[in-house]
Amino acid sequence: MTHGRPSPTNDAQIVVSGLTKQYRNVLAVNNLSFTVEPGRVTGFLGPNGAGKTTTLRMLLNLVTPTAGVATIGGHRYPELTNPLGHVGAVLEASSAHKGRTGINHLRVLCAAAGLPRERADQALELVGLTPAANRKFKGYSLGMKQRLGIAAAMLGDPRVLILDEPANGLDPEGIRWMRGFLKGLAAEGRTVLVSSHLLSEMQLLADDVVIIAAGQLVRQGPVDQVIGSMAQGVRVRVRTPQADALTAALAQGPATVENDGQGTLLIGGVDAPTVGRAALAAGVELHELTTERPDLERVFLELTAGKAGIR
Amino acid sequence: MSNLVRSELLKIRTTSTWWWLAIGAFLSIALAFAFNAWLASETLTGGGEEFGYTGDAASAPAQAANLYTSGQYLGLMFVMLIGILMVTNEFFHQTATTTFLATPRRTSVIVSKLIAASLLGFAFWLVTTVIDLAAGAAFLSLNDFGTQLGEWEVHRALLLNLMAYAIWTVLGVGIGTLVTNQLGAVITASVLYLIGTQVVGLLFLLLANLMDNMAVLKWQVIWPAAASQVMITPGENEMLPVWWVGALVLVGYAVVSGVVGVLITRRRDIS
């Protein structure tokens, strides 16, 4: 590594460094830096208008950054010798000519990238769209459009996948298919970067997350670590007809108790066995005792609170 | 580059728009041919003065040249529209994203569109000319005017017609890169082509009268459609510049719009 050439393992690493985009009235992305590693699914999260799409488009050379640089395997996108063979991207579901058939849309891209024609058929097969190959794009459902976008991204068998809100418009079956598909790609050692605002879906899908708000980085890291880093950790949820008695019983310890006034307590600072023991000692009747771990949604909302999405 | 040109030609082949434009062009050939055939037969039987055809313009080769290039007026507009659509379609259907992902070097994309456009212009010319030659030669020989196919004036008209088709398609691509709004570009270009030329002609006539100098009319050549007319018109007089002036102006427009289009496209944010 004495020269600038990236090692093979870094071939699929995404590095965003000091990326900034100033539109006429809006600072869409502000000095943003993060890295995305191969072999993992990375969720790119942020409220609407946080600058996710602009960032992805700068990474792909579709939008010119005001400052900073984004590289894939050490190269800026236009410097890649075989872009479709290196990076596959799905940016918006509607990016095909409405009067062109799905298979022809892919053939046009194959021709441009110098790929054999058969890749178009294989890519359609891969996303399960073969039966609709000769149907015009305007007759596709939103889910079919998403699948065609993924087929286009997979044409060159790329090592890096970049997807902007791929779950939009998919039905539950489609979402489950997508989850398995992307996890499978990451398991093959590919880099998968997925932007989304569907947090429960991201918790199931992502290994790492990059959270941005108002164009700036808020948090980056493995999902568990990001969730664990929050001050509001594990809480115990209790349902009891004797809420006041239990609150009094816990008053001596480190517990913090939140009473909703309808028989449900949210207790922080102690674990479930401690609460159970205290209830038994005080003779309090319990109807429910559960440990509540913070989920990605709660962490996300706390992290991005007050950073208005619309600027 | 050949991959990109192939991709551009495939884009055109796989949509139906160009079929409609081709049908339009061939309808206009049929109409123009019928009219020109009637004109030739009247002129060559001595009635040319009624239409302002005297001297060289009333000769058999001149009339044959006119007949063999029938349909050019609207045909040029149709190839220009195809050139425009080659670019504006990418923005209208948001395919610019996938196009520039497959080929991030945008200059190559525009240059391949220019090459594909001129190939298409050539194909349009070829088909038009074959139709015109077959029908025209049949008409002229049936009426005993002679096919005139050996005349340089006819050859010249055919070659300049080819040049016009190629340049107007390229010009269309240039216009498309400058005005990416599909409806805006198509309507503006059609109106300017069809009506603009008459308006410009009228303005120059007024100007010539005002300045009491008919030579002012020569300057109409700065208008692309007028330049196209100058290029294909034989001869030269105080109101009409020599043909290559028109050719130069037209090539100038194509080059400038192409270069500006490339520069703009390189800097444009695709979002």
Image (tube, rainbow, N blue to C red):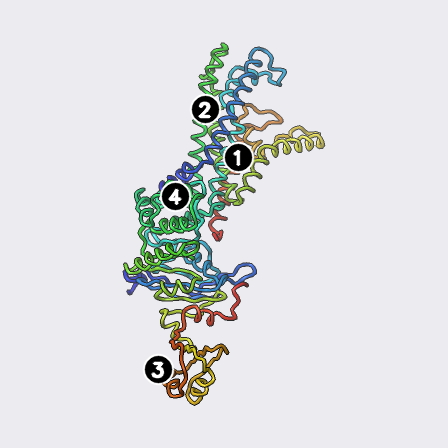
Amino acid type, residue under disc 2 in the picture: Thr
Are the two marked residues, 1 and 3, in contact with CB atoms closer than 8 angstroms? no
Residue under label 3: A273
Asked if labels 4 and 3 share a chain, the reply is yes
Q: Is residue B115 visible?
A: no
| Numbered disc 4: secondary structure | helix
Are the two marked residues, 4 and 3, in contact with CB atoms closer than 8 angstroms? no
- The quarter of the picture where the N terminus of chain A appears is bottom left
Question: Which residue does the image show at 45% across and 24% down from the upper left?
Answer: B129
Residue under label 4: A102
Are the two marked residues, 2 and 1, in contact with CB atoms closer than 8 angstroms? no
The location of residue A302, given as percent across then percent down, is: 47, 72
4 or 1: mark nearer the eye: 4
Q: Estimate the spatial distance between the alpha carbons at disc 4 and disc 3, rounded to whole Å.
A: 58 Å
Which chain letter matches label 3? A
Q: For this view, does A20 lie left or right of residue B52?
A: left
Amino acid type, residue under disc 3 in the picture: Pro
Residue under label 2: B129
Residue under label 1: B250
Residue B13: mark in rendering: none
Q: Looking at this view, is A110 or B209 the one in front?
A: A110
2 or 4: mark nearer the eye: 4
Q: Earlier in the sequence, mark 2 or mark 1?
A: 2
Asked if labels 2 and 4 share a chain, the reply is no
The location of residue A9, given as percent across then percent down, is: 28, 62
4 or 3: mark nearer the eye: 3
Amino acid type, residue under disc 1 in the picture: Leu
Q: Is residue B255 above or below residue A58?
A: above
Asked if labels 3 and 2 share a chain, the reply is no
The location of residue A100, given as percent across then percent down, is: 42, 41
Farthest-out residue, bottom: A252
